[in-house]
Each structure stands twice: as C-alpha cells, then as structure tokens.
Amino acid sequence: MQSIYQYYNLEQIQNKKVVCFGCLEAQEFALRLLGQDICFDYFLYLGDEDYCLPHFMNKQIINIEQLKLLDRYVVVASYRELEHAYQIFSGTAIEQHIVAIERIHPLISNASNLVIYGTGTRAGRVFESLYGYADVKMFCDSNQDKAGTSFQEKKVIHVSELSDYPKDTCIIIGSTYYDEIRDTLRQYGVDEKYVFYAEYGLTLFSNDGYKVSYPIKSLLDLIQDCKNKQIAIYGESGIVNKMSKIFSNLNIEVQVSLGRDGFEENGTIYSLAYYDLQNVICIMTDSYTSAAHDALEQMGLRETQLAWIENYNSFSVSCTDRAYNCVLDPHLGHAHIKDGEEYSGFVKYENITFGDSAPFIILALGGSTTSGYGVRQKPWSEYLSDMLAQKCINHVIYCGGTDSYTASQELIKLIRDGIWLKPDCVISYSGINNMSIFSKVPFVHYYQKELYDSLNHSIASSHWGKMRGVNYGVQPDCDSFEFWFSQIKMMRAVCDSLDIDFKAFLQPTLCSKKKLYKGDEDLDVMFLNGYGIIKENGKETWIRLKAEGADPYGKIIKNAYYFRESVKKVKEAWFYDLSDLFDGIGGIYIDPCHVRGEGNNMIAGKIYEAIQNDLKQR
C-alpha cells in the first residue's frame, strides 16, 4: 500500500526535539506523522503577542521565543508548508534547524500520466492538494455515464479505458471506497506498484491489508478526553498495535491492548471480561456493530465508556441511535424520541417516594446543553432531580432540551407540548444557539428551511398546484440578543397566562469567559480556531483568531460577549444571568458550550436556588 506522501531524512530528527510548524493547519500533517510512527514534541505558534501555553493533540504549543530556548531541536513542516517555513525563518538561526521530511511520492511528482480515481468531494480535495506539486492529467470513474464528461476542468474516463494508457500510469484513489476500487483495478490488470491512496484524518492498514481511516474530529475529541484516563483498545491486532503506539507517542498511557487475528469479529471481544474495566474508556478500532455493542454491555461497560473511533464525539455517546431516534417535526424542524417515553420528546426524571404530597412538576427547555438524549455527561436536569430527592421533595422533571433548538423552538414546544404536561414551573436554559444564528428569519429552524426548500424544488418540477417558493415570514428588525430575549419574554407571557412559574437562564459559554484557565486554552485552539493564518493583499499574517474574530466561530464569539454585556440591562425577577458561572474555573468545558458533569451539577445548583421559594410554597 502506497501513500501519496513519502518520508525521508528521518535520521536527521532522531534524538532531537521535533517541532511541527504551525498549529491547527498542521493537524493533518501531524496525523500523517503519527500514522508513520514518527514522533513529535511540540507545535509552533508564530505570533508574537503574549498568550498562555495551551496544548493541541496533547502536545504543547510553543512560540518562537520558547523555540529558541530548546536544545537539539528540529522544525518539520508538511510538504505544502515547507517553503513557507523557510521564508519565515530565512536568515535566522532557526533556518538551520528546518528539516524536510515529507514530500509527494516521486512516482507521482514525476508521472507523465497521473489519474485520480473518483469524481467526488474527496477526489476534488486530492486534486487541490497536489496542485503545483504534480500534474494530474485526468479523472477516472466506475460510472460509465461520467465517461467523456469533465471534472475540475479535466477529462473523465471509465476505468476500462485505463488499458489504453501506459503501464506506468499512476492512479490515486480519491474515494472512501478504497478497498473496492483497489479490487476493481486489480481486475483490470493495473500494477499495484502504481496505485496510491490519499490520507485524510488518520489512515492505517490491518494485517490483512484492509485500509481504515478515522476522521480528524473524532480523533481530536478522543485524544482530548483520554488525557489522564485509563484506556483499553480492542480490534484487529495490526490496527490495535498501531493505535496503541500512536497513543503512546502522544503521551497517553494504554492500560489494556487486546487484538484479535483477522479483520472480522470472532468472539475475542469477550476476552475483555478478564480485565477490570470499571473506570476504563474502551476504544474500539472496528466499525460499529450491534453485536459488539451488546457484548460490551454484557460485560458491564456503560454507554459512556464506549468509544468507537470512527464516530467518537465528546458530547454524545458512541451510537446515539440506540439511545434515541432523530425524527422530522413539522413545527420544530426535528425532534428526538425513544422507546418507552411517557411523552414524546421528553426525558423524564422523577422521584415520588416521599409521602403522599403531589409531585412538583418541572418542564426544562433548551438546546443540547439541556438535552438528556444520548449524552455522555449527566445532564443538569438529572442533577436537579438528585438535589430534590436529597431534600425529600416529590418531583417530576420533563427534560425537553433538544440539540440546536433556539429560544424560538423552545417557545413553540412550550405552547404545543409543554403546557399539556401541567408543569408547576418552566425553566428555559439557553443562549448559545441564538448567538450562532446566521439566518435572516431566525424563527425558522434550519432543518425546516432545508426541508421546505427541498419540497419546493420537488413541487416546482411537478404538476401539483401553483406553489412557487416558500414564505418564511417577516424578518425581525432587531439584533440577536433582542430577538432571543423577545422569545424568552413570550414564554414568560404564556406561563403567566396559565399561572405557571417561569425561570429563564442565560447560559455560560467558553467564548465569553473573562479569562482562559488550564484546559480552556486547549479547547480554544481546537474549536475556536485560536491560532491561525490569514492572507491580506497576498501577504500571510499570523493572528489569534479569538481576538480578531473569524467565521464560523467569529460571530459566536462576538455575540457571546455582546449577550454577556446586554444581559446586564435585564432587571426581571424571573431572569438569571449565569454567563459568569465558570469564570474562575478551568477544565469544565467539553467544547465551546457543553460542560462536563461537574459543570452540569453547578448549573443544577443555581437552578435549585432559583426555585427554592416555589418549592417552599408547595
């Protein structure tokens, strides 16, 4: 198996501190190095302003001044960034420490006939990555209908036409269906010496030669969550050994490494039962299967302990479709439901074991930061239930939080569903999703817009009626904070009209923290593009994007600060500002808005304080 990249000069980096040139833009390069068992120690940030020292992929980010203090170091860069590195450090002592270790494979860079197999997004990315480094002559596809068309202004041929070209024609598989395409090329007699794969994320090969690719986002989440945790890795032995080595190279210790012979599961998974996995994250290198999931659950592993690398997410569990289903909703865009729910779209937490008093019924509304569906961390509604139980208060909490809901969806859900649950108290915990609204019609959820735009296209091309376009209503003439608070006030009005107590809370976010603490900085880099490069008038400049603002998070960051300042003007007894809740604490956030269990416990504590008087009156 040949990658389009080749590594050389590796003897020059042995026994030296290896520094990757760049931060976020170096992540794919860093993963390629890890896949080749090439270790590195730091990422290099090129800005010159003062900043805290965060980590990325569990490796420290250093600036140029810290770089100069290192003893016996080398700076390495991807094939695309190497020239830039030489330009930055030209004429300085650092220039002598730059070592070129990555290049496009010579067979590709020198090929007189170079073909990319595929005509999709992945093939387009391969073409762009090779621009200026190799001369792609054409594209190839298995679909006969695409033969004779063009892609990226290059001719597209059918795979059968490859026999008309020289035997040394190089073919790069620009598709996720690598194994199938490789078999197809074999059938047409293509010499595998001239077949290459393009790496995105982390690419590994099993002992049987199967190619496995893991998404960057899943890997970064997993690396972030596995720091200082006990880890077990299971799967095909070749992949397991490589993943164990990668975690070791990232200074993350693996307690259990269990591999099996063959790419298919053969029952070896039950050998995990011989290990103490009570406090272990079990990382699965295989693709998800219900059989493996059931086997792990039979061994006593909790859902939150299971981590399939191919779809790992810090916030949600490995296989959320086992926990709930996401369905279309005509009023809300989408909704979550699961088997056994008393009321569709609501997770129920209750304890009515304290005497004969009627339970205090709470309706909790919000986005994913409120949701109880398929989450790794215990939600604040469940912590609140625990607190009420400790006070021997009979209660029922209907948690209606749903990912991506804004205050508008909360309002609709309250009117359509919530009031029929006859709550004593309605709690709205929100903010972040309204900070990120880009639409000019914020009352319409983007799921709804996608659905109706698609329907409109289908109807317009049919003979049904005279439908022409979609009406999304009046565009509000106000800013994002004013719109958010207008929806909150409408919820308050609905509750007032029905004699239901109402409490609203502006949630805290990583984006609006006054100061970043240990742990926060790493997330700032991962999610908020904390450090990066911009081009102005052809000149490249390094900036700290959190300070300058950059899409897609630039607007969220700006609005987060704006919400935090604007909310100071609100003087309503039913409204609570929690935007400063985690100001003096680090390591609470999973990402820019979701928090770990201890954070949800603190949120529940503040909400409990707010409803104490209502509870006493009961």
Image (cartoon, rainbow, N blue to C red):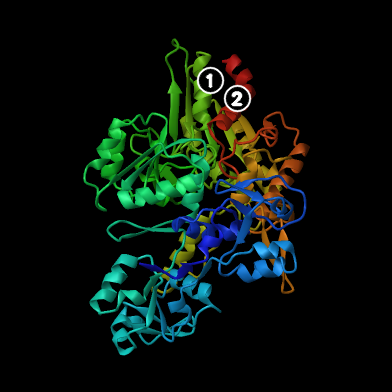
Disc 2 marks a residue whose amino acid type is Gly
Camera-nearest residue between 68 and 573: 68
Q: Quadrant of residue 204?
A: bottom left
Vertical relation: 546 (above or below) 393: below
Q: Which structural element holds mark 1?
A: helix
Q: In this orientation, which residue lies closer to the viewer: 453 or 336?
A: 336
Q: As drawn, is 495 to the left or to the right of 560? A: left
Decide if residue 115 is on the left or right side of residue 130: left
Crowding at mark 2 (Cα within 10 Å: few <14, some 14-19, many 20+): some
Q: Which residue is mark 1?
A: 387
- Whether residue 586 is visible, yes or no, is yes
Residue under the point 31% across and 81% down: 159
Counting from the top left corner in percent of width and height, residue 45 is at 68, 55
Q: What residue lies at 74% left-to-right and 73% top-to-bottom?
A: 537
User: x, y percentage for residue 359?
Assistant: 48, 19
> Residue at the location (22% across, 42% down)?
267
In three-dimensional space, the C-alpha distance between marks 1 and 2, rounded to whole angstroms, equals 8 Å
Residue at the farthest top position: 355
428 relative to 333 in the view: left or right = right
Q: Position of residue 252 (x, y in %)?
A: 49, 41
Amino acid type of the residue tagged 1 in the rendering: Met
- Asked if marks 1 and 2 touch (Cβ < 8 Å), the reply is yes
Image quarter for residue 318?
top left
The residue positioned farthest toward the left in the image shown: 266
**Residue underneath mark 2:** 605
The residue at the point 47 percent across, 38 percent down is 417
Towards the viewer: 157 or 273: 273
Quarter of the image with the N terminus in it: bottom left
Disc number at residue 602? Answer: none
